[in-house]
Image (tube, rainbow, N blue to C red):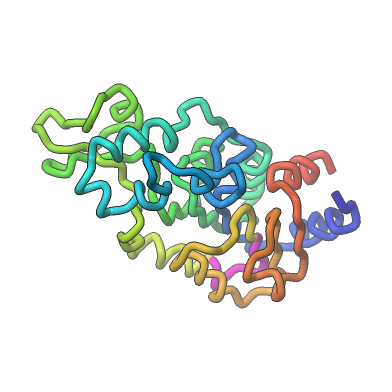
Amino acid sequence: MDHETLDRLAEIIARSRRIVFFGGAGVSTASGIPDFRSPDGLNAGEWHGLTAEMVLSKTFFYLQPEAFFDFYRKYMLHPEARPNAAHRYLYRLEKQDRLRGIVTQNIDGLHKAAGNIRVYELHGSVHDNYCTECNASYPMEAILRSEGIPRCECGGVIRPNIVLYGEPLEKYVCIGARREITNADTLIVAGTSLAVEPAASFIGDFRGKHLIVINRTPTPADEQAELVMREDVAEVFEALSRA
C-alpha cells in the first residue's frame, strides 16, 4: 500500500466535516460475504444454468419462489458475518459527527451492526422481511429456519425487503442518499465498480471538494477522483486506524 497516498487520505478525512461514504460489495468481502463481479464472485458461476442476477430478479421470485429461496438461503444470508475494519472506522467517524451518511448498495446490514445510524440502504436489508399478505414483520432468522417457501401465520409468503433486479429503488431512501451526497465536502466511493444503475448515477450529484475512490478495479469515477486507491477496502481502513 502506498503510504504517501494513505497519508493524503488521512489528511483529507481529518480536515473534512461532511463526509459521505458510498459503498458496494467490496466493503463486506473481508467479513466473508462474496461480491458479484470479481472472478470469485456470485455472478462468476451459474446456478442450475442461471446467473445470480437472473435468480435475484422480480420475475424469478414470482415464477419460481421455491428455487429463489433455495438460492437466497445458501448464498445471500450470512448470519455469522461481523463488521470489519471498514465498518468500525466509519462508526467512529459518525460518532465524531464528521460522517454525514453511508449510502450502501449492500443488503447485509453490517453498517448498522457496527453502530452506524445514518445509513441509506439502497437495496434494502436481509434483516427486514415482511408478509406479502398481512405485512407482518419477520427477522432474518425466520427465513433461515424455514424450508421451501417461508410462510406467515396468515399463510402469506414472507419475502425479504430487498430490491430485486427489475424493481425500483425506494423513493425516500434515494432522496435522502442524494441529499447527503449533494451536501458532502468529501465523498469516499469504495468497494464498488459503479456498474449498477440507478445507484451508480448518484455520484453525479457530488459538488464537494474531495472525491476518493477505493476499489480493486477501475470505475467510471476514477478520472474525476482526487485519489484512486487500487486496494482492499478493509485493509485501507485498518491502515487508517493504525495511523
- Taking the magenta stretch, the answer to whether it contains residue 187 is yes
The spot of residue 83 in percent (x, y) is 58, 35
In the rendered image, residue 113, in percent from the top left (x then y), is placed at 51, 36
**Residue at x-position 66% and y-position 49%:** 93
Among the 4 quarters of the image, the one containing residue 153:
top left
Q: How many marks?
A: 0
Q: Is residue 210 left or right of residue 52?
A: right
Compared with 76, 206 (above or below) is below
Which region of the structure is painted magenta?
A: 181-188
For image coordinates 71% across by 47% down, the residue present is 232
Task: Name the side, left or right, on which 14 lies relative to 37.
Answer: right
Q: Position of residue 110 (x, y in %)?
A: 52, 39
**Front one among 59 and 125:** 59
- Between residue 129 and residue 145, name the one nearer to us: 145
Left or right position of 10 against 16? right
Assign the C terminus to one quadrant of the image: top right
* Viewer-proximal residue among 120 and 183: 120
Q: Position of residue 149 (x, y in %)?
A: 21, 32
Q: Quadrant of residue 64?
A: top left
177 vs 206: above or below = above
Tell which residue pokes out farthest to the right in this image: 4
- Furthest-top residue in view? 145
- Residue shown at 34%/53% (left/top)? 164
